[in-house]
């Protein structure tokens, strides 16, 4: 018996005029992710269908579970749209299940099929009651909700529902630049941005030799996890050492973090513009540390006109950790390696910085040329979800 994955769009179906664009993007993303498999993929305005080989089912499910734009899916048996075929297949399928209550939900989109949905519910329900012992109908809370979609050529019978990861297909929004550190928050911010359909590019600021190769590998690893939800991610590794050292040499200690973050934003903006990204995305969360009070955020944000999206701004840490665990980044994030934000932490970072003081402190060194150099000398790594760190050996 032929089976297909029957994919439902959920949130996508609220898109009216744009629906085709969203469905087409989802279709391309699915085709791309499954290109190694001998599958046949088709779509209409309500569903996408994937014909697969049984041996690939688990692999394909694992991939589908990482594709945004899919609300839920079912493994449906495909039968010819003929009453007697539907009846015999339904009985065969359901006889293998253990359940005591059920409900049949017929959806007849082929209006030329001679039996109306309500009548067909009764016909199919009666068939099961007659042939399977010790079962009854429960229309409110059935153990097995059996859907029979009667369509023109083929009909689909299914009951188990698998939840997809929701959101919009990646590519329905243009590019955004994620500031990706080795921490817990920024990978989660990246995941949530991808979920809105944003194509991700990432930047990592490193301060060798104060930070280590292992710290960079950790970021590569996190980026790999994010890549499972999209295509390849370009990760720009920026040498932040000269800027960071100059800040600590020239500026007031309590302002060092604020100024460091303003420099990160300046570099991010330049990279974003160069790579046609329309927003900067980061893992800032209001109140988490001194540089993330609203006053700090406002002073830091003054260096750019670009939208800065902070997907976890109003989440508390436990909510962020829940997502980090779900997307499998948490265990990587908690590996203890120094990040450039943690190597020179002032004893008392300013909580309510003043913009004038920032400008005054920044005028004490020629940061413009350093920013230029940092952008020019960045290393760009292409990260996919199936790579080997050895590929980067000569860069490390
Ligand atoms: P995370 O917030 O991801 O847990 P963190 O706590 O080390 O990491 P914060 O000091 O909270 O980072 O910085 C706030 C945000 O700034 C991060 O979420 C990240 O988006 C960005 N950021 C910090 N350090 C770096 C870095 N070295 N490279 C790129 N982005 C960074
Ligand atoms: Mg943080």
Image (cartoon, grey):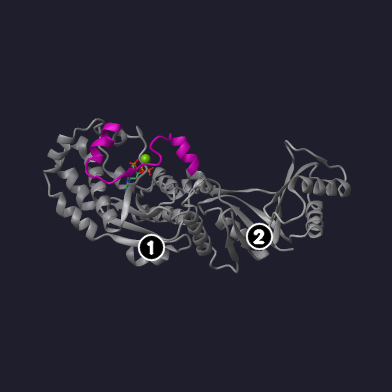
**Quadrant where the C terminus is found in the figure:** bottom left
At x 74%, y 56%, the residue is: 113
In-image side of 16 versus 242 (left or right): right
Q: Which mark is residue 4?
A: 2
**Residue closer to the observer: 46 or 67:** 46
Sequence-first disc among 2 and 1:
2
Q: Position of residue 59 (x, y in %)?
A: 60, 60
Q: Which residues fall within the magenta stretch?
A: 294-323
At x 17%, y 53%, the residue is: 370
Q: Position of residue 309 (x, y in %)?
A: 35, 43
- Residue linked to disc 1: 382
Q: How many marks?
A: 2
Nearer mark to the viewer, of 2 and 1: 2
Quadrant position of residue 151: bottom right
**Quadrant where the N terminus is found in the figure:** bottom right
Secondary-structure class at tag 1: strand
Quadrant position of residue 49: bottom right
At x 32%, y 57%, the residue is: 236
Q: Position of residue 111 (x, y in %)?
A: 70, 54
In-image side of 24 versus 120 (left or right): left
Sort mark 2 into few (<14), some (14-19) or many (20+) by Cα contacts within 10 Å.
many
The relative height of residue 393 versus residue 109 in the rendered view (above or below) is below
Sort mark 1 into few (<14), some (14-19) or many (20+) by Cα contacts within 10 Å.
some
At x 22%, y 33%, the residue is: 353
In-image side of 162 versus 244 (left or right): right
Mark 2–mark 1 distance (CA, rounded to whole Å): 33 Å
**Residue closer to the observer: 115 or 20:** 115
Residue farthest toward the top in the current orientation of the protein: 352
Secondary-structure class at tag 2: strand
The picture quadrant for ligand 1 comes to top left
Is residue 317 one of those drawn in magenta?
Answer: yes
**Residue closer to the observer: 340 or 37:** 37
């Amino acid at each position: 018996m032929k089976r297909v994955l029957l994919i439902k769009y959920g949130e996508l179906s609220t898109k009216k005029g744009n629906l085709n664009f969203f469905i087409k993007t989802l279709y391309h993303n699915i085709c791309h992710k499954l290109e190694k498999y001998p599958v046949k993929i088709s779509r209409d305005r309500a569903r996408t269908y994937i014909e697969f080989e049984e041996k690939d089912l688990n692999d394909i499910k694992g991939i589908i579970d990482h594709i945004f734009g899919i609300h839920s899916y079912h493994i449906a048996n495909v039968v010819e749209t003929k009453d007697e075929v539907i009846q015999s297949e339904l009985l065969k399928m359901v006889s293998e299940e253990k359940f005591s209550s059920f409900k049949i939900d017929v959806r007849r989109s082929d209006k030329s099929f001679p039996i109306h949905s309500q009548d067909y519910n009764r016909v199919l329900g009666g068939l099961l009651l007659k042939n399977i012992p010790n079962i009854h109908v429960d229309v409110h809370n059935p153990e097995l909700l059996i859907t029979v979609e009667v369509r023109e050529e083929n009909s689909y019978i299914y009951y188990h529902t698998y939840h997809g990861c929701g959101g919009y297909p990646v590519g329905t929004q243009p590019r955004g630049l994620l500031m990706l550190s080795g921490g817990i928050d920024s990978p989660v911010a990246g995941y949530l941005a991808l979920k809105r359909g944003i194509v991700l590019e990432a930047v990592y600021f490193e301060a060798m030799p104060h930070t280590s190769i292992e710290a960079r590998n950790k970021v590569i690893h996190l980026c790999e996890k994010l890549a499972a939800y999209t295509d390849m991610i370009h990760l720009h590794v920026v040498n932040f050492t000269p800027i960071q050292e100059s800040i600590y040499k020239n500026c007031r200690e309590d302002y060092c973090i604020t100024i460091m973050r303003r420099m990160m934003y300046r570099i991010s903006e330049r990279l974003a513009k160069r790579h046609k990204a329309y927003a900067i995305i980061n893992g800032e969360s209001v109140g988490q540390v001194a540089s993330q009070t609203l006053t700090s955020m406002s002073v830091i944000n003054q260096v750019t006109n670009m939208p800065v999206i902070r997907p976890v701004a109003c989440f508390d840490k436990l909510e962020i950790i829940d997502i980090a665990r779900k997307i499998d980044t948490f265990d990587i994030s908690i590996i203890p390696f120094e990040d450039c934000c943690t190597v020179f932490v002032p004893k008392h970072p300013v909580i309510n910085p003043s913009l004038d003081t920032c400008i005054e402190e920044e005028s004490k060194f020629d940061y413009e040329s350093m920013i230029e150099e940092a952008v020019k000398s960045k290393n760009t790594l292409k990260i996919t979800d199936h790579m080997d760190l050895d590929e980067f050996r000569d860069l490390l």
